[in-house]
Image: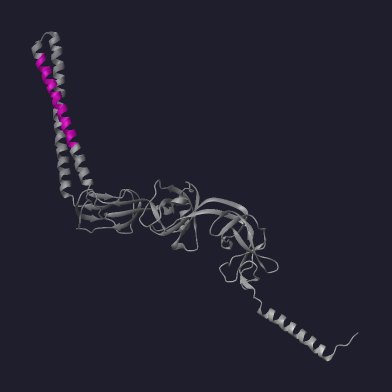
Amino acid sequence: MSHFSPFARRALIAVIVLAALAALLVYLTRPKPVAVTVAAVDSGRVEANVANTRAGSVAACRRSKLAPPLGGRIDRLLARKGDRVKAGQVLVELWNEDLAARERIAAEQLLSAQARVNEACLLADNARREAARSRQLRDKGFVSEGQVDRVESEARAKQAGCASARAQAQEARARIAASRADTARTVVRAPFDGVVAEINGEVGEFLTPSPPGIPTLPAIDLIDDSCLYVSAPIDEVDAARIAIGMPARITLDAYRGRHFDGRVRRIAPYVLALEKQARTVEVEVAFDRPAEAGHLLVGYSADIEVVTEARDGVLRIPTSALMPGNRVLVLGAGGRLEERRIETGLSNWEHTEVTGGLERGERVVTSLERAGVKAGARAVVEAGAAPPKKP
């Protein structure tokens, strides 16, 4: 074995030290692994949904804005805001003493007409019997034919008088009905059971009917809150995918963190084209179990999500892991991020169905917005992040 000269030994030591320093420098300056959040490819339900473009609202199946057809002064106000009323209950009554007086006059006229009927018809019956006796006497030769003719003519006249009296009594009944109809036009009754939402007017104030084309405030706003639904606008492009009876989910600002099941009950047969807004179609969704929502109020802000298609037990990933072009970043066993193109099926804001390119249990990155998250980068699962679900 040859011996190195002192100079050669020093040179060799210097080379080794420089190599170690270079290796240390490379190690110290290498990029640190980027912290990422990941989700495991699992199986479950994926839905295709259609949601409203602007906030909808809770509406009542029946809502009436009531007002008397005649103008007049409010004489009685028999309901208050928030009252629950029954069908047929009187809510507002205008001053109608003049109409009530006319009705009483018509009733008295009917009594007089009925008395005339009794008198005229009694006379007609007597004349008819007298004519019958005259015919019998004529047959026996006791009276002449001319006398019989006079008696029979008188009987027919009496019978006509009876008929005329009956017609006058019927006319009096019609006048009573007309008077009652006029009186009824001064009274506002509840057309159905409901709750009084609004009252516009006080006792002594004058109510005026709405002129044609000029709407005025109703006297009573009555709501049937036993049947409620949500009405919301859907973009015209998405509305074509919706059909009556499709399942839907309803969310209410008043019940954050909860949703309620429903069904599409109506799709408007026209498109709304409001200025500076997208063209939309109004869609109505009824609650499957309204009692679950508790005390709903008409006018609550609400959103709907109609399920147009659903598949169970399919491979899926969070939609937040999907990049443009159906690409994802997969965290490999060596800690390197690998870009992979996948095939997808149904998708919504939460999950996307995977039909090819990924296997169950593989981990995809969901924190794509972080700096340094790209294909080829070294990565570690962020400390404290929820571990991906095991397949």
Q: Quarter of the image containing the N terminus?
A: bottom right
Residue that protrudes farthest toward the bottom in the picture: 6
Q: Quarter of the image containing the C terminus?
A: bottom right
Residue that protrudes farthest toward the top in the picture: 141
Q: How many marks?
A: 0
Q: Residue at x 41, y 51 (%)?
A: 282
Question: Is 166 a magenta residue?
Answer: yes
Q: Is residue 295 visible?
A: no
Residue 173 vs 136, above or below: the answer is below
Residue 311 vs 132, above or below: the answer is below
Residue 35 vs 344, above or below: the answer is below
**Main secondary structure of the magenta stretch:** helix
Residue numbers of the magenta segment: 148-173
Residue 96 vs 369, above or below: the answer is above
Q: Position of residue 220 (x, y in %)?
A: 28, 54
149 or 206: nearer the eye?
Answer: 206
Q: Residue at x 31, y 54 (%)?
A: 221
Q: Residue at x 14, y 16 (%)?
A: 133
Q: Is residue 119 visible?
A: yes
Question: Is 176 a magenta residue?
Answer: no
123 or 371: nearer the eye?
Answer: 371
Q: Position of residue 71 (x, y in %)?
A: 19, 51
Q: How is the image coloured?
A: one colour
Q: Which corner quadrant of the image does residue 197 belong to?
A: bottom left
Horizontal side of 78 relative to 238 (left or right) equals left
Q: Position of residue 2 (x, y in %)?
A: 89, 86
